[in-house]
Image (cartoon, rainbow, N blue to C red):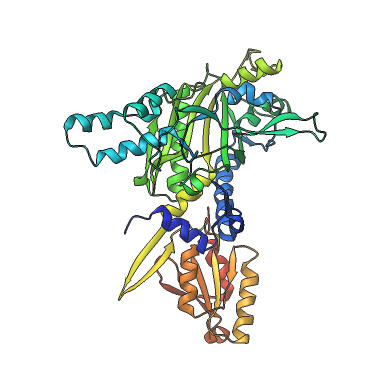
Amino acid sequence: MATTTLDTLVAFTKRRGFVYPTSEIYGGLANSYDYGPYGVQLLKNIKDLWWKKMIEQREDMVGLDSQIIQHPTTWVASGHVGSFSDPLVEDLKTHKRYRADHLIEKWVESQKSKVKSPEEVNFLNSVVVENMKLDDMAEFIKKNNIKSPDGNEITTPKAFNLLFETQLGTVSGEKSIAYLRGETAQGIFTNFKQITDSCRVKLPFGVGQVGKSFRNEITQGQFVFRTVEFEQAEIEYFFDPEKTDWKKLMEEWKASMWSFISTDLGIDSAKLRWRQHTDKERSHYSKDTYDLDYQFPFGWKELWGVAYRTDYDLTQHMKHSGKSLEYVDSATGRKFIPHVMEPAVGVNRMFLMVLADAYREEDLGEGKTRTVLKLKPNLAPVQIAIFPLQKDEALREKAREIYNSLKKYFRVEFDDAGNIGKMYRRQDEIGTPYCVTIDYKSGDSGMVTIRDRDTMKQDTVQVAELKHYFDTKFTI
């Protein structure tokens, strides 16, 4: 099977109603996308499964939904106002902006096909962009005469803050500065005391949240992988460092994360890997960080990260708020600031990964092909499609009855707008696992035909047994 390109996925998702360019009638908006009817359902299914597995089915987890706009001091305390930035350069002619680290990465890749000597090969292989600071990037760009994608000179890299600044207030001159949140995590930290006071939680325990975050992102060309507005699924897992071994805890979370991606989402494990952050790359608040990478059409990229944040965040919020965020051990009376393990994933990246991993263009022989999304049945936007085989009112009425009975329990779609082959192909493309066909024999025998998406084999089942039949197919 040929490797799926990003351009293929972009065209497919637009054509089949998964993802649309935002404000397309006005020419679009950079790094912004809308999720169509099938896309929004797939996105919801992924989030619901994450919530079920990571929050609901764990005794040591609770949930939270914090505000997008929080007190501005939140972001001063967290370090986002002072250090939440990307290295930015500007084309001196076109004034387009680019990530300096991305330009260096592309230059290195382009040079690998041109070098001849072992010394040059060794040099290119030794370049680790993640370890470079602003000054390192500036020196590397100057030394190697790296230009913009348009071939023009570029500025020296500068730190570009990613927080979106806004204002609260209705009267001009009386407005106060606020920020759209750059991550969901800080809402968990600022609510830590309220959660421990109001809920019966004991260390170790975690707080999970799914929500929108915003970053003034200038990187383009990676579809929904990197966008201005995105969703995160984050967990802050609080523990007593004197009683819990953080290294063992990290390994436990890594195992849970890998299992969710490979088993629950059904992703090919050969396209997954762990990558530990280097000392220079690791965030200032982290003692150790691992990324779970997926091999996207544009290369290995971070999907899900787990970081040992120590007590940095709660300490910072205590310092800036003047309020105690200490935890009291009910058994000993000991007061201390809990430490934190953070597994954080981009929901939109999981969405793109699921699509890329499930997309197939299959050769059926005799010059025939089909496009199919081999999604896990529980993730599919439509789980069951109902077809009357012929355009006959009696068959349509019977098909509608079956549709209405199953729709109470499953995600079901009714379709009678084409021949059976075309209807099958359309459902294959949107990932529908099963199609139910009603024909003239159904009225006499009470039997319908069920066609399996992956094998294309057909089975006959009594109408009265359909609910039970599909219950066995969609268990979590």
Q: Residue 364 versus residue 456: which sits nearer the camera?
A: 364
Q: Is residue 381 left or right of residue 247?
A: right
Q: How many marks do you count on the picture?
A: 0
Q: In this rendering, does residue 387 appear at all?
A: yes
Q: Residue 353 versus residue 268: which sits nearer the camera?
A: 353
Residue ranking furthest to the left: 117
- Where the N terminus falls, by quadrant? bottom left
Residue drawn at 59 percent across, 53 percent down: 22
Q: In this rendering, does residue 330 appear at all?
A: no
Measured as percent of width and height from the top left, residue 378 is found at 52, 56
The quarter of the picture where residue 184 lies is: top right
Q: Residue 148 versus residue 198: which sits nearer the camera?
A: 148
Measured as percent of width and height from the top left, residue 421 is found at 45, 77
Image: 295 above or below 72: below
The quarter of the picture where residue 211 lies is: top right
Image: 143 above or below 464: above
Measured as percent of width and height from the top left, residue 475 is found at 53, 56
Residue drawn at 71 percent across, 15 percent down: 322
Q: Is residue 39 left or right of residue 124?
A: right
Image: 133 above or below 162: above
Residue drawn at 36 percent across, 39 percent down: 106
Residue drawn at 62 percent across, 41 percent down: 212
Image: 57 above or below 369: above
Q: Residue 371 versus residue 84: which sits nearer the camera?
A: 84
Residue ranking furthest to the front: 93
Measured as percent of width and height from the top left, residue 390 is found at 54, 85
